[in-house]
Every structure is written in C-alpha cells, then in structure tokens.
Image: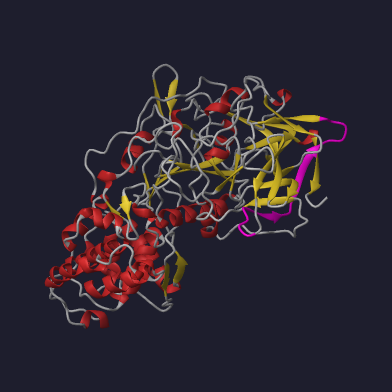
C-alpha cells in the first residue's frame, strides 16, 4: 500500500520540498510552446532540436532529464518513426500508446498452407483459429489519451510532433510520481516508482524489470543519431542507485514466475499451452519430449505474432491450435512461457527443426514496416535467447538463431506455403549486438565468404504488398538485400523454382523471399564487379549491390561445401532424416525426399553444423510408442538460399573459404 503524501522520507531526494499537483496544471499551459516553431524554422532543422525538447520538457514538468531520456531510449531509442505507430499502437520517442489507431487488417504472413507441425507421418495441421479482437484495451495501451489530458495538447500533435510527444511523456512521469506521493525531485534516484509505472505493466515483476533497464541506461549513458537525423546524448551516471522500495508502494499485482525457464533479468510468467486429447485420436497442441536427453536443441526460431498480445495468448491456449515456447510483449518486454524446453512445440513448419528448436513469438506484424518494435522487447528477447543459448549450448549465429523465414520446407510441395516472418523489418544487427555478438568483418578482402551487413536505417529497398497486393509499402529501413541475375538493378531478380515451379520471376512483394538475403547470413563469393558482389544462391550466381561507400556485406572466413569430385550436381534437402535402415520395427520410414534445387559442381555454400540424420516419432497422445531414430548418414546444414538447407556429407567436400 502507498503511504500518505506527508510521510517523511530518509533519502536526500525525499527531504526536498514537495511540489503540489498544481505544477502539472501550470506546466500544461507552457506545453504548446514546445511545438510552436514553424516547420521551416532553423530550430526545427537543427540536429539538436530533439535534445532541446527533452531539456525543455524536463524543466517544465520537473522531471530529471536523465530519467526522461532513458525512458525514451528504452521505448524507441529516441526515434520518432515519422509519426507511425509501433506494433502496440505506440507513438513517438516516448511510445505514447493509442491502440485504437494501431494497424488492423494487414495481410497475414500465415495465410499460406504451412503445416506448423511439419510432420509428414500425420495429417497436415491447418488450424482455423483466428486472432480474437480485444474487447477492452488495457491501460498500457491508452497512455496517449492520458498525456493529452495532462498537457492539454491534441492527440494528433502528440502522435506526430516529437517535442510534444516528449512533453507528454514527461507529464505522465510527473503524474505518476505525484500519484505515488513522491516529490518532483531533481535527483534521478527518486523516480524508480514512477518509471516502473510508466511501463504500463500491471504486475510488479515486469514493472521492476523495466525500471531496472531504465536505470541501467542512465548508469551506462547512450548517444546516437536518430532516424530523423537528430543527435541525442545521455551522459553516464555510473554510481546511480535508485530507491527501489518505491515499487512496493505502487500497488501492482504479483505474478508468479514459478515453472518458467527464464533468466532472472526478465519478467516471465507461465501460461501453459494445453496438452489435451480430443476427438478421435486428435490431441494438441504440442508433443511431450525429453530434451535435451533424448535429442539436442540446436535452434532458436524468431517469429512475429501477426496479432496483439491478448489475442495471441488466447490462441496458444486452444488445444486445437498450434504452439510455441514463449511470447514476448512489445510495450514492456514481458514474457509468457507456454511450452517447456523439454517438449516440442508446433511452430516452425518443419518437424526436424521443431524437434530441435525453441520458438519465440514477438508481438508484431511482418507486413507493416512502420509498426516498429520497442527497445525493451528487443532487450528482453536478447536476454532470453542468450540464456537459452548458454543453457543448451546453441551458438549465437545465423545458422542457429533462425527467423521463421529461414526454416526450409520439408519437401517440394511445402515450399510455397512456408511462413516468412519476422520479415525484412526485424533489425538483426541490433538484435545480435544486444546478444553481445554483433556482426563484423572476419577476413581480409581475399576472403571467400561474405556476411550480409547493410546499415539498417540507410538500407531501404522497395517492397510491395504490405496493405494491398502490388501496392508499394512505406519506405523503411531493412535488414535484407535484394539479389539480381547480373550486376545491374535493371536485370531480372533471381528465380526460386521452389516457390515458382514454372520458372516465373521473383517479385519485390514483402513476403517473397525468393531473391533476397538477410543480415548476418554468410554466403560464398562467386564473383566481384565494381560495386557489385556475386554469391552462390539456390544453385545460381546471384548479384547484389555492395558499394564501398555504403557496403551491404563484409568479408568473412569459414568453411564451405562443394560437390565431391566426380559429381556434377548433388541433391539438397529440407530436413536431415535417417536412412531407411535406421528405423526400428513399428516406426514408419520417413522418405528422404530432396527439394527441387541442385548444388552444382564449382559452387560453394557456407557450412553450419554436421549432424546425423534424426527423426522424432511422436504421432500419438500416448508417449509410450514415441522414439528418437538416429541414423548413420551424416548431413551438413548450409546457407543455400534465404532459408537454410541440408546436404549429405557423403556428397560433398569441405573446404576453407580462402581456397
């Protein structure tokens, strides 16, 4: 319970004179001045305008500037995103939420025919469940309305004017501070409770995690140039220690983390996916296992939800639907775990990958480029992935940390229906920087491999199909680079005969991954021509623009595979299944079916793991007949196209990329 406003405090900040609620009322009269300069003014053109807006709002609302800057950094990294909303309807540098204006009706990347389970030993799973609408918006999704009330500014100005948006955030912090009975102190240490409240979280664990992250930003300091060219800096205060006891007085509910498999640095709760039997032999929505004792966990698969938090949680609790291991909330990075790591969730559309992976769904939308993710969700996700990677020995690279769009189809017929999330607007370089493994050059110019590494903000390829088929998407930074059949942007795009068996050209549709590569992926160099670099891709020589002044790839080293001497071509597979002799009685043999692509002599592809053929037989609710079948035939995972693939070790030679 919160103490009365007149209670004495023992810290220096609490001994300062308390300001009255009238401060907010008088401050509101000053706020229109922050956005009053005409659009063409020198002040607006200045790269320091946003920094000045933080200083002005902090002074007006008596919020420490360091607190205001750190909260904003954790929300948006100080980006304004051109006034476009985040995935949860948050606007501007302060991520003021107005979910009534959030995107709706965007094309769903899951409208294809992907069988999320991806196990050909049983009937394909195509659930009909749709993401339900939220009947009532939680408070965390309505902060812009409250900011408008506090400041007297129109909601539209708070959405589109960064200075007004910052002022709205300052007003919310000041209101939270006063509601907690705390002084409007100029000591950042006195604002822990208000920062926790600002997160919008309704539980103490999530609010505390958020506040701890804000104070970590203050202690370490930050500086960057925003998406609008604004230079913003926050000086480090390494010795700052907040008054964490304020959180106890904030009146938030307690959520138990019991049963979860999460690091202590995130907020996590257990919302189980049901393992239930229904109908005649039907059950869902995952399979029990004994990982890693029975089989290794080699992959972490990154998804986006294509729906909002509350609706998606209802879906994963439906026994007739699919499942994944974790869901992450955009507003505050809160995590819900649904399936234990020892069990197999149905999420990636490839049973081999499902049986060896953990799936993370992030609240978001692939086909809405401006629907950005918060920094707090990126950080929470990176902490969870780092924890899982350490626990299960998973390397932190793009051969093991896959997007759903990097998971291959299991057979030729499944390729066109495979999902394409998280898509081109997921910032892989920032994500791996948070993981402590940023991508960088690992070889001299003579290296035989490249790592795809465009500047996310400056790399802005055109896409279509975000709202209406064929219509241009909003221009936005991207992690992906387009591939051409020759060293010219007027030449045809690379063809993908798996996606288009008739040989039709690839397109620039946001869901068409047939002719593009993604940040962090490594490919063998096939040629260079001025500002252009060629790589081996889907059995073809594929060219991408790689100018020295604005490179889209850096040189790398490593191992590659090429067909064994004497073989003109070798098959490529979407799963590493055992040879038929490995299957015991009672377990139906799974066909080792190649994909339609060929790896030709003279071509090279970057190598991931060498693994035995493996199949987890688990088509029944009763776990007694479940078996893990491991063969003697070995495979290499390779970066073959946008998706990974597998080749038999007996078919290839392994070489150094420098050879």
Q: What colour scheme does the image use?
A: secondary structure
Q: Nearer the viewer, residue 496 or 363?
A: 496
Q: Does residue 319 appear left or right of residue 521 in this picture?
A: left
When asked about the image quadrant of residue 628, the answer is: top right
Q: Nearest the camera: 370 or 327? A: 370
Which of the pair 594/161 is nearer the observer? 161
Whole-percent x, y for residue 332 in the image: 35, 54
Q: Residue 417 at x, y = what percent?
A: 52, 27
Q: Residue at x 43, y 39 (%)?
A: 367
Q: Is residue 546 left or right of residue 53?
A: right
Residue 207, by quadrant, is bottom left
Q: Is residue 275 visible?
A: yes
Q: Is residue 270 left or right of residue 541?
A: left
Q: Nearer the viewer, residue 443 or 272?
A: 443
Question: Residue 408 location in percent, x, y?
Answer: 60, 34
| Visible residue check, residue 201 | no
> Vertically, is 85 above or below 404?
below
In the rendered image, the vertical position of residue 51 relative to residue 533, given as above or below: below
Percent x, y of residue 91: 32, 54
Say if the magenta span includes residue 466.
no
Q: Considering only vertical position in the picture, is 224 above or below 282?
A: below
Count of numbered circles in the view? 0
State yes or no: residue 566 in magenta.
Answer: yes
Question: Vertical placement of 128 versus 356: above or below?
Answer: above
Look at 26% across and 57% down and name the residue there: 158
* Magenta-highlighted residues: 549-568
């Amino acid at each position: 319970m919160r103490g009365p406003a007149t209670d004495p405090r023992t810290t220096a900040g609490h001994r300062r004179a308390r300001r009255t609620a009238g401060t907010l009322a008088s401050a509101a009269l000053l706020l229109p001045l922050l956005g009053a300069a005409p659009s063409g003014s020198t002040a607006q053109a200045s790269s320091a305008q946003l920094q000045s807006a933080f200083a002005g709002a902090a002074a007006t609302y008596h919020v420490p500037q360091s607190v205001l800057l750190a909260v904003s950094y954790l929300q948006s990294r100080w980006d304004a995103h051109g006034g476009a909303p985040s995935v949860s309807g948050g606007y501007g540098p302060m991520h003021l939420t107005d979910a009534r204006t959030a995107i709706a009706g965007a094309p769903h990347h899951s409208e294809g025919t992907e069988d999320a389970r991806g196990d050909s030993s049983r009937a394909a799973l195509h659930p009909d469940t749709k993401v339900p609408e939220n009947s009532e918006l939680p408070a965390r999704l309505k902060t812009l309305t409250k900011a408008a009330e506090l400041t007297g500014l129109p909601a539209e100005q708070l959405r589109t004017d960064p200075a007004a948006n910052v002022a709205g955030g300052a007003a919310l912090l000041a209101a939270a501070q006063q509601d907690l009975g705390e002084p409007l102190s100029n000591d950042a240490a006195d604002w822990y409770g208000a920062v926790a409240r600002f997160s919008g979280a309704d539980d103490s664990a999530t609010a505390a995690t958020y506040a701890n992250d804000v104070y970590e930003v203050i202690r370490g300091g930050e500086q960057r140039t925003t998406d609008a060219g604004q230079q913003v800096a926050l000086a480090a205060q390494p010795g700052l220690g907040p008054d964490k006891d304020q959180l106890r007085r904030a009146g938030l509910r307690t959520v138990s983390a019991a049963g979860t498999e999460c690091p202590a640095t995130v907020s996590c709760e257990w919302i189980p996916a049901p393992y239930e039997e229904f109908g005649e032999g039907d059950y869902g929505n995952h399979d029990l296992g004994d990982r890693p004792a029975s089989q290794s966990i080699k992959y972490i698969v990154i998804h986006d939800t294509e729906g909002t938090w509350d609706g998606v949680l209802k879906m994963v609790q439906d026994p007739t639907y699919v499942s994944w291991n974790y869901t992450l909330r955009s507003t505050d990075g809160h995590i819900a775990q649904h399936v234990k790591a020892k069990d197999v969730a149905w999420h990636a559309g490839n049973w081999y990958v499902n049986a060896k992976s953990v799936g993370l769904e992030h609240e978001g939308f692939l086909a809405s480029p401006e629907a950005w993710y918060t920094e707090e969700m990126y950080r929470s996700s990176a902490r969870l992935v780092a924890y899982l990677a350490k626990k299960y020995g998973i390397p932190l690279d793009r051969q093991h940390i896959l997007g759903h769009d990097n998971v291959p189809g299991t057979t030729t017929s499944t390729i066109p229906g495979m999902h394409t999330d998280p898509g081109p607007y997921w910032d892989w370089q920032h994500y791996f920087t948070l993981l402590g493994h940023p991508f960088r050059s690992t070889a001299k110019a003579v290296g035989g491999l490249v790592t795809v590494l465009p500047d996310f903000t400056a790399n802005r390829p055109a896409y279509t199909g975000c709202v209406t088929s064929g219509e241009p998407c909003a221009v936005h930074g991207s992690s992906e680079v387009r591939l051409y059949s020759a060293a010219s942007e007027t030449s045809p795009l690379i063809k993908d005969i798996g996606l288009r068996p008739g040989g039709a050209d690839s397109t620039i549709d946001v869901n068409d991954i047939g002719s593009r590569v993604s940040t962090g992926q490594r490919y063998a160099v096939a040629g260079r021509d001025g500002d252009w670099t060629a790589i081996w891709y889907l059995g073809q020589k594929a060219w991408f623009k790689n100018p020295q002044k604005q490179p889209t790839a850096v040189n790398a080293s490593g191992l590659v595979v090429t067909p064994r001497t004497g073989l003109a071509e070798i098959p490529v597979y979407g799963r590493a299944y055992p040879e038929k002799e490995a299957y015991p009685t009672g377990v139906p043999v799974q066909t080792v079916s190649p994909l339609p692509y060929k790896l030709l002599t003279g071509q090279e592809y970057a190598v991931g793991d060498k693994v035995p053929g493996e199949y987890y037989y688990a088509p029944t609710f009763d776990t007694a007949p479940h078996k893990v079948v491991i063969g003697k035939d070995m495979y290499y995972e390779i970066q073959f196209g946008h998706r990974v693939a597998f080749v038999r070790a007996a078919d290839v030679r392994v070489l150094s990329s420098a050879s």
